[in-house]
Amino acid sequence: MSISVRLTNEEVQLIKRYAALKRLSVSDVVRTAVLEKIEDEFDLKTALQALEEHKKNPVTYTHDEVKKILELG
């Protein structure tokens, strides 16, 4: 599948220079950048949700307590 994106000449040149610097294709650079951005946003959303849950129930455990709970030794 292909996707079209409109870019200014300056943006195209920047991406091409970056791709050349990293010895990657323009396609690889754009694909990686988009997927990393999406992953970062999902990670941030997950972290914020975990923080909110922790604020509601601020219970923490030490490493040793977790090992004991999980019967790991």
Image (cartoon, grey):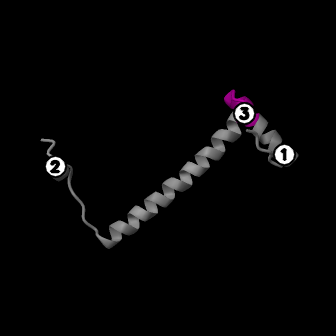
Q: Main secondary structure of the magenta part?
A: helix
Which of the 4 quarters of the picture holds residue 16?
top right
Tell me which amino acid carries mark 1: Glu
Q: Secondary structure at mark 2?
A: helix
Tell me which amino acid carries mark 2: Asp
On screen, 63 above or below 73?
A: below
Q: Secondary structure at mark 3?
A: helix
Q: Secondary structure at mark 1?
A: helix
Q: Residue furthest front?
A: 1
Q: Residue at x 59, y 45 (%)?
A: 36
Residue 67 is inside the magenta segment: no
Tell me which amino acid carries mark 3: Ala
Residue located beneath label 1 in the image:
10
Which of the 4 quarters of the picture holds residue 33?
top right
The mark nearer the N terminus, 2 or 3, is 3
Distance from Cα at disc 3 to Cα at disc 1:
14 Å
Percent across and percent down for residue 47 are 44, 59
Distance from Cα at disc 1 to Cα at disc 2:
55 Å
Q: What span is in magenta?
A: 17-27
On screen, 38 above or below 50?
A: above
Residue 26 is inside the magenta segment: yes
Instruction: Say which of 52 and 19 sits in front.
Output: 52
In the image, 72: left or right of 57? left
Percent across and percent down for residue 50 are 39, 62
Instruction: Say which of 13 and 66 sits in front.
Output: 66
Residue located beneath label 3 in the image:
19
Q: Residue at x 73, y 30 (%)?
A: 25
Residue located beneath label 2 in the image:
64
